[in-house]
């Protein structure tokens, strides 16, 4: 399990924000929930693979939300610093 997102100085939470961060910045790491809808996360996976950004797969969306410190399910998050 990867808890570094909790202590990250800069992070984004959510699929749209993670996608924007991949287009603008170069995140150090992207966390993706294994049970997220494939059509939502496939573009993130493709960009990460092309840009050689590390992907950390988290068991489910509830756990990823907990790791990010939010009370909702989360499909993706990115650590910027």
Image: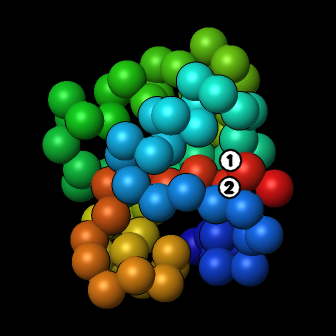
- In the displayed structure, 67 sits above or below 45; it is below
Seen at 38% across and 74% down, the residue is 65
Secondary structure, mark 2, is strand
The image quarter containing residue 38 is top left
Discs 1, 2 touching: Cβ within 8 Å? yes
Check disc 2: other Cα within 10 Å, few if <14, some if 14-19, many if 20+: many
- Left or right of 54? Residue 72 is left
Look at the image and tell me whether residue 70 can be seen: yes
Marks 1 and 2: which is nearer the front? 2
Residue situated in front as seen by the camera: 9 or 51: 9
- Left or right of 12? Residue 15 is left
The residue positioned farthest toward the top in the image shown:
50
Q: Earlier in the sequence, mark 1 or mark 2?
A: 1
- Left or right of 67? Residue 79 is right
Residue position for label 1: 29
Relative image position of residue 40 (x, y in whole percent): 25, 35
Seen at 39% across and 55% down, the residue is 14
Seen at 24% across and 50% down, the residue is 36
């Amino acid at each position: 399990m990867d808890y570094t997102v909790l202590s990250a100085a800069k992070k984004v939470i959510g699929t749209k924000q993670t996608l924007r961060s991949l287009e603008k910045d170069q995140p150090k790491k992207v966390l993706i929930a294994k049970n997220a809808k494939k059509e939502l996360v496939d573009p993130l996976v493709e960009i990460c693979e092309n840009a050689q950004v590390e992907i950390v797969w988290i068991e489910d969306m509830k756990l990823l939300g907990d790791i990010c410190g939010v009370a909702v399910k989360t499909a993706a998050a990115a650590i910027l610093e």
